[in-house]
């Protein structure tokens, strides 16, 4: 199913739900429009009929018209819902806002209250209330609203806390707004969607609860009709006919459904929550991807990426949007190559696409990735099994989140060793210890710890050990030091350099940090707006970058292009995917721009042996020749 | 961990106090007089005064509560105003059917809900949509209405199961189960669909975490990721919800026991409420609150077992 019909089906369901609530409103305000009969008029000759022309929904034991009884019972239901929802929403929102916004003691007090309300055995307390004030819907539903406020308090408090951390609240404070004004003008509007969603849930639960109370005989006194009471009367005659149960049952179910659907629609509107499977199955069919070009050169490269393109579905429209176009580079055995660019340049997407794990539900749309003679873009699930972990290892940016938080480090490493080598548990355990030693975690206690008990640097070492478990020939490391502080960064980089040398393991290092490049990399691939714009040795990049973007990176503040510094800021912003110009994507930020730059796509031009830049002005200065 | 348990236990004391006081005060607000309710409208004023004095109803409210509390702590919950039966005995006898009902319903809701929710999360697409819809309709049909429907179909139309009644587990496990099939089937769908939705959201949430990608990239098979790692990490919120669900099943039990004439706590409370039988109602409140507290404790223990961050705190 595509999104459009789904969306439509959803919208029409919401419309139906709204219509149903409209019908209920008519039943309360103008019951005469729906039924001309008196709900109390008995006709013993027409007892227990099913639907007839006379009685559209049949009759009960006393021959009373069920439709009419249902319609005249609606008022009680809606009144009860209104009371419970208003009480719960007012109480829940106010207390939640106060707790979340002010924090401290006030927060603690409100949360205890919420705990207490939560622990109250709701229906029992309701029974107590109902028996104290018999047949009083308003009081019973007020009590129910208080009980239901507990959940809302928590939700509103949580949202308010995260709001408070945001910039604009601080700005409003600086601007001299009082707390009450901030809450009223800034916090409340943002919470509205959330509160409506909760309110619709509470409404749904109230309908059921109220029907239940009436069913038990705690509703308005007979003979006044109520939905729950109708069900109770239906039960009494169940042995003769099950029919009288159906109309009130259906009325309750439809009303609950209507409230839930409306709540769902509001939630979708406010959060855009349409989740799809995030752990996509490997593509079993051979993909219909056009190959970039035939691979004729017999270079020794361990990884050879040719014309790789990738697309990610748009968050709103779900239409695939190209985020990487025609990326080509290669890595020799034992070599460390840096993949550099600003965030959004496509560097991470490129690296993960090599592993067949294009993020955001995206896919590779063209090109090839030759890894030891196998084109990964067309690899089958079986072939991937030999590549991931055993051929290529992967280290992620946030080391604290890289391992399963619920299992001990050593156990996870041992499981990885067993998976890749098939050794028994005992051997795997000692191999795991060796791996930890290889990443300079020699304390045997580390293996017994859980990931959250490790410091950032230790966790990153453990994550590297995890990636090494299958002795890969290529390690893809995505910003492996970004989340760490400076001294730890340096030691992790030194470790990567040593591991690469000792194991003659190639490394593809994704980074936005030129300092990391300078310290670690042999060669560099610079990406900009989804394209490779320059490919050269690290020396060439730092001594004479040819692409104006690379040059700008360095020139903007050469002294800052040191270890540990983020890329210097360049005037202007990079075009986002989908808004790429036809010609050079750098044109709007380039001081050397000419009309010709904007005319047509700019190819990569070779300016030194093996070094290329995607800039037509390179040709003016050098004898550059176009390459793929 | 121990601190966690102790803290929860420490909180349960004021909780019990507040809730019992609350219901005590509420019930004492009942218009009319308990003594008159017992003796009937034609009783002489002297008789009523005598009964009031006998029941301690002539004392201030707080004193009444405190003396009730003093006796309750020693395990004496008083006796029914109407039948004179000892409340602790009555309530104890009523415990088994209710606990059977909510335990079985929670277990089956857990199994069905987790299976559906996880499948829908890892497969996505149509099944996911289906779980969404099912979870709505499951919540939409009130348990007692479903109970009535089940009785109409499986007890009246085709008498496969008993329409009413309860058999002790000790006297016959088979019949015990047989008698509980319909009540559990009535209580289950709402709970199961709530669990399914939570399981689905939690699984999707974990699938989005970095370690799943790291595992995938490092060659951990899909099945292993889902069944050994994702489920374990998604279990926390699901267990919390199971706690909420079993507590809310207590509420549903009141109605479902009523439909199936199960001699449980819920139906005892409903009857006591309609007869203004304060001691019995108060006893039921105490037991219900205790059950909710125990459920909370169980949830905490399971959470701690699942999550080292909680366990090692
Ligand atoms: S092609 Fe033109 S606009 Fe693009 S980088 Fe080179 S000089 Fe600048």
Image: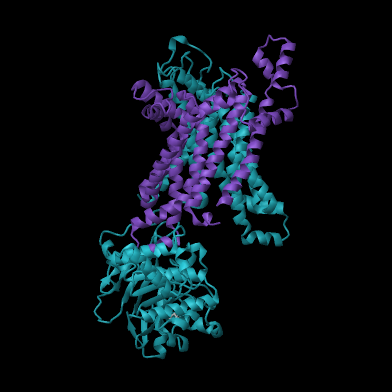
Which corner quadrant of the figure contains ligand 1? bottom left
Q: Residue at x 39, y 63 (%)?
A: B215
Q: Colour of chain A?
A: cyan
The image shows residue A541 at horizontal and vertical percentages of 45, 85
The image shows residue B281 at horizontal and vertical percentages of 60, 26
Q: Quadrant of the C terminus of chain A?
A: bottom left
Q: Quadrant of residue A376?
A: bottom left
Q: Residue at x 47, y 76 (%)?
A: A492
Residue A199 in the image: above or below residue A453: above
Q: Nearer the viewer, residue A219 or A595?
A: A219
Q: Nearer the viewer, residue A562 or A297?
A: A562
Q: Residue at x 47, y 86 (%)?
A: A542
Residue A7 in the image: above or below residue A516: above
The image shows residue B220 at horizontal and vertical percentages of 35, 62
Query: Is residue A275 something that shows in the picture?
Result: no
Q: Colour of chain B?
A: purple
Q: Nearer the viewer, residue B9 or A346?
A: B9
Residue B248 relative to residue B154: left or right = right
Colour mode of the rendering = by chain
Residue A535 relative to residue A212: left or right = left
Residue A10 in the image: above or below residue A144: below
Query: Is residue A532 something that shows in the picture?
Result: yes
Q: Quadrant of residue A603?
A: bottom left
The image shows residue A430 at horizontal and vertical percentages of 37, 68
Q: Residue at x 72, y 9 (%)?
A: B44
């Amino acid at each position: 199913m595509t999104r459009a019909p789904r969306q439509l089906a959803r919208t029409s369901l919401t419309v139906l739900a709204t219509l149903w609530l409209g019908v209920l409103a008519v039943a309360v305000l103008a019951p005469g429009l729906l039924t001309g009969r008196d709900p109390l008029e008995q006709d013993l000759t027409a007892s227990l009929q099913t639907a007839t022309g006379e009685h559209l929904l049949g009759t009960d034991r006393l021959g009373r018209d069920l439709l009419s009884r249902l319609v005249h019972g609606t008022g009680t239901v809606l009144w009860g819902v209104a009371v419970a929802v208003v009480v719960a929403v007012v109480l829940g929102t106010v207390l939640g806002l106060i707790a979340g916004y002010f924090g401290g003691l006030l927060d603690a007090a409100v949360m205890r209250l919420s705990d207490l309300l939560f622990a109250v055995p709701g229906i029992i307390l309701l029974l107590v209330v109902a028996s104290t004030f018999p047949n009083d819907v308003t009081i019973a539903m007020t009590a129910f609203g208080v009980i239901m406020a507990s959940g809302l308090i928590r939700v509103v408090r949580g949202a308010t806390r995260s709001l408070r951390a945001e910039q604009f609240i601080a700005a409003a404070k600086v601007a001299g707004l009082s707390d009450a004004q901030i809450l009223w003008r800034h916090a409340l509007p943002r919470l509205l969607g959330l509160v409506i969603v909760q309110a619709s849930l509470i409404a749904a639960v109230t309908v059921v609860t109220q029907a239940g109370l009436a069913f038990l005989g705690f509703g308005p006194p007979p003979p006044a009709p109520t939905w729950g009471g109708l069900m109770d009367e239906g039960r009494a005659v169940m042995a003769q006919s099950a029919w009288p149960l159906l109309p009130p049952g259906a009325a309750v179910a439809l009303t609950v459904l209507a409230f839930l659907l409306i709540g769902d629609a509001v939630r979708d509107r406010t959060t855009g929550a349409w989740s799809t499977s995030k752990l996509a199955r490997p593509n079993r069919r051979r993909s219909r991807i056009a190959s970039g070009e035939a691979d004729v050169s017999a270079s020794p490269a361990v990884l050879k990426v040719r014309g790789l393109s990738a697309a990610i579905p748009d968050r709103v429209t779900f239409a695939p949007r190209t985020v990487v176009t025609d990326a080509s580079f290669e890595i020799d055995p034992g070599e460390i190559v840096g993949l550099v660019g600003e965030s959004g340049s496509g560097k991470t997407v490129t690296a993960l696409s090599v592993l067949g794990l294009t993020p955001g539900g995206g896919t590779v749309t063209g090109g090839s990735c030759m890894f030891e003679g196998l084109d990964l873009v067309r690899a089958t699930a079986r072939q991937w099994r030999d590549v991931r972990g055993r051929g290529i290892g992967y280290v992620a940016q946030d080391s604290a989140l890289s391992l399963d938080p619920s299992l001990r480090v050593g156990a996870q490493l041992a499981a990885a060793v067993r998976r890749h080598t098939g050794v028994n548990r005992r051997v795997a355990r000692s191999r795991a210890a060796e791996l930890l030693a290889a990443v300079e975690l020699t304390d045997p206690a580390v293996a017994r710890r859980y990931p959250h008990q490790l410091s950032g640097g230790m966790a990153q070492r453990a994550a590297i050990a995890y990636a090494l478990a299958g002795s890969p020939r290529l390690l893809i490391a995505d910003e492996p030091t970004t989340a760490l502080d400076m001294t730890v960064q340096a030691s992790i980089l030194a470790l990567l350099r040593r591991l690469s040398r000792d194991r003659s393991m190639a490394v593809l290092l994704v980074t936005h940090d030129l300092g990391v490049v300078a310290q670690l990399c042999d060669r560099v691939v610079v990406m900009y707006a989804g394209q490779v714009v320059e490919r050269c040795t690290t020396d060439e990049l730092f001594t004479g970058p040819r692409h104006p973007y690379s040059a700008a990176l360095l020139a903007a503040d050469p002294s800052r292009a040191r270890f540990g510094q983020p890329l210097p800021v360049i005037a202007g912003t990079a075009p986002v995917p989908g808004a790429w110009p036809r010609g050079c994507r750098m044109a709007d930020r380039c001081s050397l721009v000419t009309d010709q730059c904007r005319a047509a796509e700019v190819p990569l031009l070779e300016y030194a042996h093996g070094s290329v830049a995607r800039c037509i002005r390179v040709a003016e200065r050098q004898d550059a020749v176009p390459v793929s | 961990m121990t601190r966690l348990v102790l803290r929860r236990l420490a909180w349960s004391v004021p909780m019990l106090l507040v809730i019992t006081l609350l219901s005590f005060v509420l019930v004492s607000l009942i218009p009319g007089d308990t003594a008159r309710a017992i003796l009937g409208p034609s009783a002489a004023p002297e008789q009523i005064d005598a009964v009031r004095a006998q029941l301690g109803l002539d004392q201030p409210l707080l004193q009444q509560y405190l003396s009730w509390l003093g006796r309750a702590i020693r395990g004496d919950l008083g006796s029914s105003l109407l039948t004179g039966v000892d409340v602790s005995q009555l309530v104890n006898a009523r415990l088994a059917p209710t606990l059977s009902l909510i335990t079985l319903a929670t277990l089956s809701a857990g199994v069905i809900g987790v299976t559906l929710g996880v499948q829908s999360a890892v497969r996505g697409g149509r099944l996911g949509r289906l779980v969404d819809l099912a979870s709505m309709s499951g919540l939409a049909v009130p348990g007692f209405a479903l109970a009535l429907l089940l009785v109409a179909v499986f007890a009246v139309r085709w008498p496969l199961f008993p329409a009413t009644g309860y058999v002790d587990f000790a006297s016959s496990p088979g019949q015990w189960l047989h008698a509980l099939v319909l009540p559990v089937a009535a209580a289950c769908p709402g709970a199961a669909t709530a669990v399914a939705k939570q399981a689905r959201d939690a699984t999707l949430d974990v699938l989005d975490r970095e370690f799943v990608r790291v595992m995938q990239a490092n060659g951990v098979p899909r099945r292993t990721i889902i069944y050994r790692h994702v489920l374990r990490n998604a279990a926390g919120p699901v267990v919390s919800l199971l706690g909420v669900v079993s507590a809310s099943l207590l509420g549903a039990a009141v109605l479902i026991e009523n439909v199936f004439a199960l001699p449980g706590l819920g139906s005892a409370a409903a009857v006591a409420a309609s007869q203004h039988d304060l001691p019995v109602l108060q006893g039921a409140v105490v037991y219900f609150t205790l059950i909710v507290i125990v459920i909370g404790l169980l949830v905490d223990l399971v959470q701690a077992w699942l999550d080292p961050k909680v366990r090692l705190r």
